[in-house]
Image: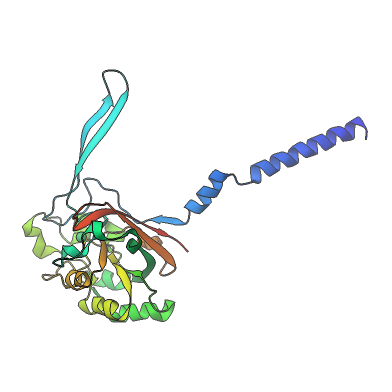
Amino acid sequence: MNRFSKKSALVFFLVAMATFLVSRPNNHEQEREEGKQFLDMTYPFDETSIYWPTAKPFMLTKVAWGKSEAGWWYASNEFSASEHGGTHADAPIHFAENGRTIDQIPLEEWMGPAVKINVTRRCAGNRDYLLSVEDIEAWEKEYGKIPLDAWVIMYTGIGTAYYPDRKKVLGTDKTSQEALPELSFPGFSQRAVEFLLRERDIRGIAIDTPSIDPGNSKDFRAHRILMAADKLALENIANLDKLPEAGATLFVIPMLIKNGTGAPARVFAILP
Ligand SMILES: [Zn+2]
């Protein structure tokens, strides 16, 4: 081997090594690849978060935010809010006397297959649309029977498109009692909830509006029937347009409030 070919061999080796090192995914890249499979379905909590018009909204107060006298940084906030606002979970006690509180529900019960029933077109034509048994059956015709321990999600499109615009999501931007007669958004029909409880085995139901009952409900039947059956609910969940109709797994991490009737929750899905 002459000097020239030795040099060429060395250059070839270095180029090959460099190519190998650059093209080989390192651990960080692998993590990022896996990260693409997660879908965050939570709205951030801030002063615009949607709460029931009569409930205390989310408030964040800066207690400290700056350099201390000694020169180091220190930041700390206080927050307060109703349990039922923003992206949150409802425990059975919310509408069922002696029902379980948030802290009595084991972690595994917050996970399950995500069933997304898309009724966005119907809700666009009627803000007070009620999810029907027929809507559930139409989903099953396409994707098969609702799997065991599923979260059945009503995709109204209303919250997904407009949150946190109160007027467009709630139907009114008034607060306190005077807002209540003007509330207008879709929800689950009594028959649909009864069907899911009697004919299927679910974890709970979820929706991209502030309530599983429609805005114009006066008797909260969906809540009452669901929670009498010891099941769970999620409200104001985000990014439903990015969740597939079937095949994802939903995870809910509610704040562990002792005796909580509900709690702010981090909701996410692992996509198929
Ligand atoms: Zn609630």
- Residue lying furthest top in this view? 70
Ligand 1 is located in which of the four quadrants? bottom left
Above or below: residue 148 compared with residue 88? below
Residue drawn at 28 percent across, 65 percent down: 207
Colour setting: rainbow
Q: Position of residue 218 (x, y in %)?
A: 11, 70
- Asked if residue 155 shows in the view, the reply is no
Q: Position of residue 156 (x, y in %)?
A: 29, 67
Residue drawn at 59 percent across, 44 percent down: 26
Say which quarter of the image contains residue 47: top left
Q: Position of residue 139 (x, y in %)?
A: 37, 77
Say which quarter of the image contains residue 239: bottom left
Nearest to the observer: residue 74 or residue 177: 74
- Residue lying furthest right in this view? 1
Above or below: residue 45 compared with residue 183? above
Q: Position of residue 103 (x, y in %)?
A: 24, 56
Q: Quadrant of the N terminus?
A: top right
Counting the numbered discs, the total is: 0
Say which quarter of the image contains residue 159: bottom left
Residue drawn at 36 percent across, 70 percent down: 150
Does 101 sit left or right of 161 as displayed? Answer: left
- Residue lying furthest left in this view? 178
Above or below: residue 26 compared with residue 136? above
Above or below: residue 19 compared with residue 175? above
Nearest to the observer: residue 111 or residue 104: 104
Residue drawn at 78 percent across, 39 percent down: 13
- Asked if residue 212 shows in the view, the reply is yes
